[in-house]
Amino acid sequence: MQRPPPPEDYSLKETSPHLGGGGVTGDKLTSTYDLVEQMQYLYVRVVKAKDLPAKDITGSLDPYVEVKLGNYKGTTRHFEKKTNPEWNQVFAFSKDRVQASVLEVTVKDKDMVKDDFVGRVMFDVNEIPKRVPPDSPLAPQWYRLEDRKGDKVKGELMLAVWMGTQADEAFPEAWHSDAATVTSESLANIRSKVYLSPKLWYVRVNVIEAQDLLPTEKGKFPEVYVKAILGNQALRTRISQSRTINPMWNEDLMFVAAEPFEEHLVLSVEDRVGPNKDEVLGKCVIPLQNVERRLDYKPVNTRWYNLEKHVVVVDGDQKKKEIKFASRIHLRICLEGGYHVLDESTHYSSDLRPTAKQLWKYNIGVLELGILNAQGLMPMKTKDGKGTTDAYCVAKYGQKWVRTRTIIDSFTPKWNEQYTWEVFDPCTVITIGVFDNCHLHGGGDKPGGARDSRIGKLDSLRHQATQIVSMRLSRAEPPLRKEIVEYMLDVDSHMWSMRRSKANFFRIMGVLSGLIAVGRWFDQICNWKNPLTTILIHILFVILVLYPELILPTVFLYLFLIGVWYYRWRPRNPPHMDTRLSHADNAHPDELDEEFDTFPTSRPADIVRMRYDRLRSVAGRIQTVVGDLATQGERLQSLLSWRDPRATALFVIFCLIAAIVLYVTPFRVVALIAGIYVLRHPRFRHRLPSVPLNFFRRLPARTDSML
């Protein structure tokens, strides 16, 4: 009887890679890539040629260069009828895959039947010099061409040949022997690249009032509203309650825009003259370049804008359109620079800085990431009758996206690329994903199925922000495609998943649920929701002050001892995706089928589709609420868990200091002052969140370890 294969072990594993770049030769570091393994490459830079002989009967030459090392061969583009061509192309051959001892660089003439041999240059691989950054690039040299017998012929070729690593500045744009099977049209899709997200702004449009509207039906009270359009975003106000030609709204509309501003803000005042029939009373177009940028709490000035109306005028037998300015609209429009535009999930935010650069604080350090390799990848597509995967890695932190090169046809790809980011806030998350490149042989984005509408105002703005980011990054070369950006930004995090719901349920079960109820009750007491109850609590508090002074010092000292005791079991590994926490290791196939199903569902029965979609839509909201509750409880637990060593150390030291201070100070004085301060009337409270609350909100939760 054949035994079933053992289950896959997805737990965190400790590895010992041979990281390069740490050695010192003389007074220089051997490499800036000190977080990855060094990969040796043979680089050939083909610069240009001169005085090439003509080969065709017509006396012309269509030259190109073929670089060959063992079984790997790369070619430059060819020029038509040119004896002094310039290519400036770089070829990189992986030393691990090549066993040849001779490098052959051949100049050939492009022909319809068979390419003609012009001349070549041979190099002994063992004699090629090594170059290690930060050394200057190797200067190219002129080499005289030889024929197949080794005799000198007419023509010279400028080359630079050296041995280097992936730290070489020529590496990203070079042709790689690992991708020898990729067509020249698809080479751009496999190269590593760094992208920057566009600068996003919130556009606040405060629609105040309009004056001197000219409705078509004179005897009817107008039902007027304002429609605002920015790109593919469209919002509208409610119908004005003042049914006059001078309606008032005083309503805010929020949009997301990206620099450089490509679309104008279009506002139209419309009158509902019948069911599903609206008439435009006036329109104005506002370029966002002219909109004031708000950097503080002070409101911007209001402004009146003229409303254009196209009127058909009959002049004899001809009809023509004229623009009239009879009405105007009162608006307050600004670009909100004091807020951070959310394009990520709030639990996975990598950047919390406001849009306006004037409000940024100094960076606190540099994040360095070394992307080494992956193991155990599954075949994602079929090629020549066998499964294959062309894997590349994407990392996102702040506005900077990085994409590694694509490793062709490998289930254990090795990238060994290193990147850096500036860090402005330690309470942020870096997101890393592995993807299969399915655009190596032409084709574009596959049209997706229907999707549900985003729920709520904030989520709608985030959806617009992700759409803008994905659209801008897809226009880069090579493009960072829409499905990649949406996956990295966790666009579908609110969708229903039985696996995620179970995981969130067990997370919240691990937290003391009574703390939430006690916190809400205490908040009502502090805000004097019921004055009688609050007065009774004050009386009870004064009575408790008369009890022994060792109660609070004992509590804080106990917390301090717990924190010190738990220090022995502090996490030894960095935060990572936990499959057990995510319930991914024992998910039922039917649950996974439901999770990866399209929305709306692709199941055939109409009644099942209706009920199934309704359940997923409602359950997605419940899932988000449950996850938020679990996050708050886990933040409380992280005070003593050493998940964030700095935060836990601060809290433990605070507990020790508080224990000493409260022991020395008379208990009645401390308790009386603290109690009166906590239970003070709302008119004596500051509107901004307190320092302890801000500290608590920045504590880590296990959300970033969830799949």
Image: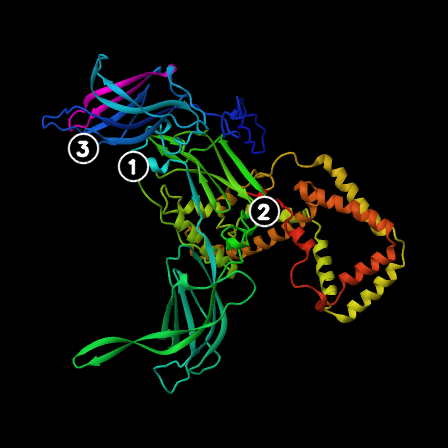
Provide the secondary structure element on which disc 3 rests: loop
Q: Position of residue 33 (x, y in %)?
A: 50, 30
Q: Amino acid at mark 3?
A: Glu
**Residue 604 visible at all:** yes
- The figure's colour scheme reads rainbow
Residue at 30%, 21% in the rendered image? 68
* Pointer 1 residue: 185
* Pointer 3 residue: 80
Which residue extends farthest front?
Answer: 27
Vertical position of residue 305 compared to residue 576: above or below? below
CB atoms of marks 3 and 1 within 8 Å:
no
Vertical position of residue 222 compared to residue 158: above or below? below
Badge 2 crowding class, 10 Å Cα cut-off, few under 14, some 14 to 19, many 20 or more, is some
- CA–CA distance between discs 3 and 1? 19 Å
Q: Amino acid at mark 1?
A: Glu
Which marked residue is nearer to the observer: mark 3 or mark 1?
3
